[in-house]
Amino acid sequence: MIRVVLVDDHALVRSGVKAELQRAVEVVGEAGDVGDAIDQIVRTKPDVVVCDVHLPGGTAADVIAGTAERGVTSRFLALSVSDAAEDVIQVIRSGARGYVTKAIEGDDLIDAVKRVNDGDAVFSPRLAGFVLDAFSADLSSPADPELDQLTAREQEVMRLLARGYAYKEIARRLTISIKTVETHASSVLRKLQLSSRNELAMWAAHRRIV
């Protein structure tokens, strides 16, 4: 039987998803934030992790990176209320095998878990186009060594800064503290050798990444 860990910061959501999945898979762990998720996954080594995108302490991308650093090779299926292109692309680039929205039916979610476990890529129908567009652009565009200096979270913060969001707004959107936003912003400016948000906005606009 496929072994699954559920990651979502809402206990009621985890309970509902667990009830659906347990008809066909074994749920071996649950977590509500990034740190607990990494610990649970490292401890239980599940076949598949069904993970919300935005979590206290970070995102699904942080969970993927954190477990990979500790040598765990579980496959990830993102399950989110968000159908924003930037969320889909960021999670898939981080290594998830699929992305479905919480509007999915129970039987379809079970099927998605099984397919991800088998190594397939799985997306809700309207989301697949985002991924195709993003990776088609990657194939036709040269690598950007400056952008590659930034971590996935720094790139998230960079894009929001370049769009003019205040630190407080960024903190709310990414579910992190304002202090953490400030730390990431300083790191972005330092790595890119820029001195202000205005310079960052021009840098990002020139590369068409906002």
Image (spheres, rainbow, N blue to C red):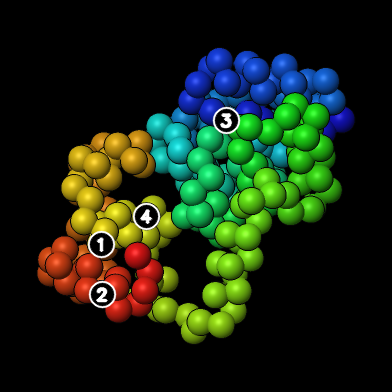
**Quadrant into which the C terminus falls:** bottom left
Q: Is 137 in front, or is 24?
A: 137
**Residue lying furthest front:** 126
Q: Nearer the viewer, mark 4 or mark 3?
A: 4
Q: Quadrant of residue 144?
A: bottom left
Tell me if I can see residue 197 in this picture.
yes
Q: Are marks 4 and 1 in contact (CB under 8 Å)?
A: no
Against 45, residue 135 (above or below) is: below
The earlier-in-sequence mark between 4 and 1 is 4
The earlier-in-sequence mark between 4 and 3 is 3
Against 41, residue 67 (above or below) is: below
In the rendered image, which residue does mark 1 sit on? 162
User: Crowdedness of circle 2 by 10 Å Cα count: few (<14), some, many (20+)?
Assistant: some
In the rendered image, which residue does mark 2 sit on? 203
Q: Nearer the viewer, mark 4 or mark 1?
A: 1
Q: Measuring 20% from the left and 46% from the top, which residue is drawn there?
A: 167
Secondary structure under badge 4? helix
Q: CA distance from mark 1 to mark 2?
A: 9 Å
In the rendered image, which residue does mark 4 sit on? 156
The disc labelled 4 sits on which kind of residue?
Glu
Q: Is 47 in front, or is 162?
A: 162
Could you say where residue 30 lies in the image, as x and y percent from the top left?
A: 60, 24
